[in-house]
Amino acid sequence: MKNILLLGSDASYLAQEIKGFNVKTVFTKKFPDGETYVRLPVDVQNSDIVYIQNFFPHQNDSIVEALLTIEGLKDYKANLKGLIAPYFPYARQDKKFLEGEVISFKAIIKLFSSLGVKRIGSINTHALKKPGVYTIEDVEFHNEDASPLLYSYFNDEEFLAVAPDKGAEHLVSNFKKKIILKKERGKYVDSKASTQRPVERIVGDVPEGVERAIIFDDMISTGGTIVKATKFLLSHGVKRVSCATIHGLFINDAVEKLKDAGIEEIVTTNSVKNEFARISITPIIHRLASTFFEL
């Protein structure tokens, strides 16, 4: 069997960066009623396939496209070796906070498992925190860490590494100069827009005389946490603040809020396509694809 790296529509931007593999792309379009049309390249027939689909910014549509693609691969007698999702969807709800909530992370993995997906590879999945290989709903889930790629970008610079909360502590653990801030949250606010405990304030011990600080987090969504952390650092004598993240979602006016807060530089990987992507995740894609093809 020949090996094919098959890209979904939300991962097609990676096509020009991936070298050393036979890369093909799924053709998709929308029907007038909003439903998704999928057509596979005929090359997939009787081939070993590693399927790459990203799940942002069109999470729900991308999931449907992935399900149709995986089902189509069965019809063409292709052997799906694994799914690679640089940004894995619905991974922020990994536990129940309010009565009646659904653990969406487990539900999405179970959905893929029901179609026969045995392996999933992703990058800094929010629900898992630490890198490693996990077994979730009978799926072998490879959670890769892109933080070393972020570190190498700033390799020759002097700075204080900052985790904006306990959840990001692992991202700064290798730095000698580091601090972990703490978020103090209020009560849950349940509205149509969101269900969350708003961050009321940031606390932490900032050393004196810090010229530059870089805030590291696994993702930036609305930017609220980074904004509060930036204001806190600047108010405690830090002269310049930048931020670095693996997944740059930048919902609504997040970028404007970050700049208004005083952020000097924003750096992300291209796990999600955005204007601040300075770091390529293709080394991780290559590693995962090679591993899956060999299994």
Image (cartoon, grey):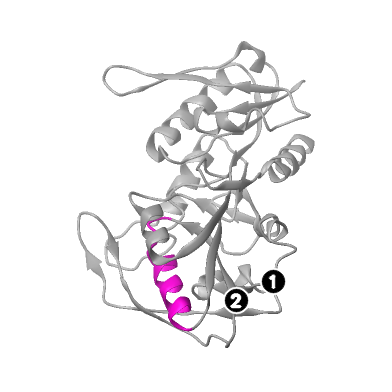
Please tell me how crowded label 2 is: few (under 14), some (14-19), or many (20+) other residues with Cα within 10 Å: few
In this rendering, the count of numbered labels is 2
Is residue 144 among what the camera can see? yes
The residue that appears at 57% across and 31% down in the rendered structure is 13
Counting residues from the start of the chain, the first of labels 2 and 1 encountered is: 1
Q: Is residue 96 above or below residue 33?
A: below
Q: In this view, does 26 lie above or below 188?
A: above
The residue that appears at 75% across and 43% down in the rendered structure is 287
Q: Is the magenta stretch mostly helix, strand or loop?
A: helix
Q: Does the magenta stretch include residue 2?
A: no
Name the kind of residue labelled 1 in the image. Glu
Residue toward you, 202 or 80: 202
Quickly name the residue at label 2: 211
Quadrant where the N terminus is found in the figure = top right
Residue 108: x %, y % from top left: 45, 46
Q: Does the magenta stretch include residue 223?
A: yes
Residue toward you, 28 or 232: 232
Residue toward you, 67 or 201: 201
Name the kind of residue labelled 2 in the image. Glu
The answer to whether 16 appears left or right of 263 in the picture is right
The residue that appears at 65% across and 72% down in the rendered structure is 159
Q: Are the residues tagged 2 and 1 within 8 Å (C-beta)?
A: yes
Is residue 127 among what the camera can see? no
Residues in magenta, as a range: 221-236
Q: Secondary structure beneath disc 1?
A: loop
